[in-house]
Amino acid sequence: MLARREHSRFELTNKLERIGGDLDELPGLLDEFEAKNWLSDRRFAQSYVADHRAREGAIKLAHALRQRGVAESLIGEALESLNERGDGELKRAREVWRKKYGVEPGTAQERARQMRFLLGRGFSMETIRHVFRQDDE
């Protein structure tokens, strides 16, 4: 499983529990994997954010990492790395919007629909408002 992609400890535990076997040895085995650096929640969080940053906002990324059992401190580190790369939230939101729509909404109803789309992708309302402001271009 670890050869295919990174997993969080929580994810790997759940997968191995479903397979069955001697569950008493599982914590020790996972500790050994972490000691050998085969399993790392930090590396998983960085990898997950890198794979999903082009289409999801920070809110959705953080939620997905929490669902996979990653600690808040590691989530913060992974999301900070987005800004360090110059891959800011506003820039990413504009790119997601541009790929989906590309033209300014003509009506209030269309604008609301486009805003809901970005909300669903995990961008904050503040970021979404900036996407639709002309003076920020």
Image (tube, helix red, strand yellow):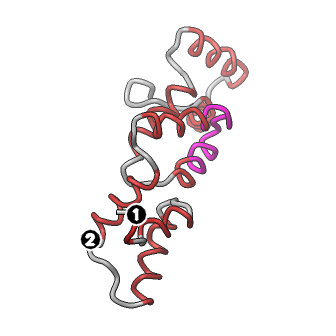
Question: Which residue: 33% across, 58% down?
Answer: 95
Q: Between 46 and 102, which is closer to the camera in this rendering?
A: 102
State whether residue 17 appears in this view.
no
Please tell me in which quadrant of the rendered image residue 14 appears: top right
How packed mark 1 is, by other alpha carbons closer than 10 Å (few <14, some 14-19, many 20 or more), is few
Question: Which residue: 46% across, 39% down?
Answer: 82
Question: Which residue: 41% across, 76% down?
Answer: 114
Residue 97 magenta: no
For badge 1, the amino acid type reads: Asp
> Where is the N terminus found, in terms of image quarters?
top left
Query: Which residue corresponds to mark 2?
Result: 102
Query: Which residue corresponds to mark 1?
Result: 136
Above or below, 130 relative to 7: below
CA distance separating discs 1 and 2? 16 Å
Pointers 1 and 2 in contact (CB under 8 A)? no
Q: Which residues are magenta?
A: 62-75
State whether residue 100 appears in this view.
yes
